[in-house]
Image: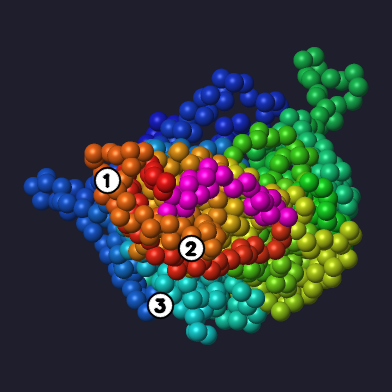
Amino acid sequence: MLAYPSLHGVAHSSPPSLLHPCRSRRLFLTSSSCRCSPRPSRPSLSSLSSLQSLRIKKCSTVRAMVDSQQSESVLESSEDGVVPGPQKYSVKIPVGNRHILVETGHIGRQASSSVMVTDGETIVYSSVCLADVPSEPSDFFPLSVNYQERLSAAGRTSGGFFKREGRAKDHEVLICRLIDRPLRPTMPKGFYYDTQILSWVFSYDGLHSPDCLAVTAAGIAVALSEVPNTKTIAGVRVGLIDGQFIVNPTTKEMEESELDLMIAGTDSAILMIEGYCDFLTEERLLQAVEIGQVAIRNICNEVEALVKKCGKPKMVEAIKLPPSELYRHVEDIAGDELVKALQIRNKIPRRKALSALEEKVLTILSEQGYVFKDEASGAVEVLTDDYEDEDEDEVEVIDGEVDEGDVHIKPIPRKPIPLLFSDVDVKLVFKEVTSKFLRKRIVEGGKRSDGRSPLEVRPINSQCGFLPRAHGSALFTRGETQSLAVVTLGDKQMAQRIDNLVDTEELKRFYLQYSFPPSSVGEVRRMGAPSRREIGHGMLAERSLEPILPSEEDFPYTIRVESTITESNGSSSMASVCGGCLALLDAGVPLKCTVAGIAMGLVMDTIEFGGDGRPLILSDISGSEDASGDMDLKVAGNESGITAFQMDIKISGVTLPVMEEALRQARDGRKHVLNEMSKCLPPPSKKLSQYAPLIHVMKVKPEKVNLIIGSGGKKVKSIIEETGVEAIDTQDDGLVKITARDLLSLEKSKAIIANLTMVPTIGDVYRNCEIKSIAPYGVFVEIVPGREGLCHISELSTNWLAKAEDVFKVGDRIDVKLIEINEKGHLRLSYRALLPDVNPEKSSRQQTSSSMKENIPPQDGVIKIATRKPLRKNESEQIGEPPEKAKMDKDLQKKVKTPVKDFASEQGKSAGKKQEFTKTSVNIDMDKPKKSNSTAVTGMVTSEDKVS
């Protein structure tokens, strides 16, 4: 037998927690006071320090005792003093159409417990650790959960500068909440050791999701640890594919699923559900919950068998509860005033009245001391009787016959000693008593704090267009809960980027951000990053609205919804759903339908408060009913079905019949809310705001996308700068999105992109085209905005040119004809093909004169160059031209055509219409007179002698 060190220097066979003198009164030591004996005043700081050190020593002794037992068992099983290696325990548990593997004992042995759960090639590791000493008593269990998806699990690294995981992403925070919410109801009251659950994804195969695996792994780790939980929990996902429910479907199967349901619970009850669907009926949802409950029951049964093999003893002795008589004292002191305070309808006055009453009770029970009335009167009587019993044989002495030295003392009753309790215990008990009185008022009187019946919904008021410059806004008020929803529309650059292990999409085109400032409840708190609660509520509202959004093809905008809670008295997330829906309509988003949300509460045990034993379900719960109730069920959707739902339980669980009744009552509540939302004044505008950006979607051939982008993105940047649009987004499939602030710039960019990607036809003629640049081999002419072609130097004149600069300059405008398109899509243009023919009569005379001079030798006036360049293409046609023709060409080349119309101005005038370019064909007579060889052609200039 183990000997436990005593707190008073004596060894005992019982744990130290059972030896305290207060155990007979079921009291325990706290950091603020010791209830071993009544005291008239608060203890000094020195006594507090000694008591705290004594308590720490006591708790450390308990933990050391458990560790020594485990060490002795290991030593006894070893041979020759050699400690054996870690013993591994494993079990395969059937889940759905496959098995999951649970392993423990071989990893993380210094933690209170640790497990590895494998599904396919996805591995999740979870550990549980407890603090060595308990923390200060509070009204919540000191549990913290951290979940992290290591990108190395999928062979990836972070895309940021720091190549390691840092602050938890929103996706990881949501999974932390999935782990935390079902575990809290299983933790006993009075256990104040800080408990931490850590979960990592060590391997991910891309098929088996780690989130539901992490819930199960955390539940198994807690069951194997020293935490005195009441039940083992597990979690599964349920999908609906082709009308069939599937437990823990793969990621590929979930792409086709109509339902995404996460459910957690014990072998006998449901503790948490959260899911999203596309207007699923309540009946189908209950079927999914029932199938998930069966799978959870099988997992819990297998885990219980594993706990019997390798689980650690639970720290039941560490559970410390307030003394039972304290509940009676609080009710005696504050009962009547508490009933009156709970009848105050407004939240802030009721909260102030309860705070003042709590302070009064705290002062009496922890400072002044409380004397029970019956106990005080009873103490006097008892003392009197005791004295009479002692002196009943004494003989009465007559006056004057008393001997000297005899003293007769009259019995004086002793005053009862006031009872003092710790501040923490008084606060805990006062909160529980307040909750009890509130539940009693609802069950017995049928009235809630604000005077409503259990089925009644608070008054609703809503208005749209609340903010003039926002793209869409709505102010939704339900009772004392108010949400200001604002919608912002943008392009792809406004989309939210995702860098998660599981999610494959890189961008989210719709997201809702929920904020809960302390001013919404009249409090003062530090402002910082969004809390886990804010992230969770925002995701619930986001998934509630997602099914009613139009597709990206119908509405190519990125949508951001901000919900700021300006007042809160319960159900603020469902107010965000209602306000967000109205704001989307006000922004002109073509929604498929309208949705609303409502929160449901529950009072499970009604017999205690004079009820008939049936659970009492409350519609549209307030904050106090949420805190004092047994359930918080949020349901969003319309009359025909559900889009999102979330349920948290504060008791040991609820059954399917209770859920069925709650969902039915929630459907009636949604209908009422939708009817009230239809009375919104002013109503939503249902059209795009004048301040919203304009987005135009074009479809071009995929091979033409590079023409829009240009080398290094130069072309698309030049289009943005030239037209003034905000962004041009291109995709590999040929989809082009143009975002602009005004219609004029949008039409300009549309025309440029249309011209860039058009398919020209050989023979088309383009008028008044600007020369953009000049090269040694020709000029580049912009035939349409953004589209250029090369006019070779040989096509600039019917005569030979050495330099294009001699005749043309940048900015000149000419008419050109498309004569060739090569295999790369480059355009070859001709200016010469559009030059007018000379006068036929004059041409005939020139031909005759040329024939008469056919045999005349060259004259001295001809300039001769020794070195001649080879003839270019079509240059042979110029040989033998009459001198009049050469002179006419030379004069014509010196005349530059003046601009007829500005093409850009034509684009601006045709805003809103599709631009069509007129392609004119010019018939040029190519039958020229027969030329003689009497003309001498030189490399630069030609000159001919006149006939004398």
How much space separates mark 2 and mark 1, taking CA atoms?
Answer: 30 Å
Identify which residue is drawn at 55% across, 51% down. 814
580 drawn magenta: no
Which residue occupies the extreme bottom position in the image?
Answer: 243
Report the residue marked by disc 3: 96
Does label 3 or label 2 sit earlier along the sequence? Answer: 3
Contact between marks 3 and 1 (CB within 8 A): the answer is: no
Q: Residues within 10 Å of mark 2 (few under 14, many from 20)?
A: some
Span colored in magenta: 882-909
- Place of residue 818 in the rendered image (x, y in percent of width and height, measured from the top left): 47, 62
Which residue occupies the extreme front position in the image?
Answer: 948
- Place of residue 292 in the rendered image (x, y in percent of width and height, measured from the top left): 50, 75
Identify which residue is drawn at 49% across, 33% down. 55
Instruction: Give the label, 2 or 1, closer to the camera.
Output: 2
Contact between marks 3 and 2 (CB within 8 A): the answer is: no
**Looking at the image, residue 867 lies above or below residue 827:** above
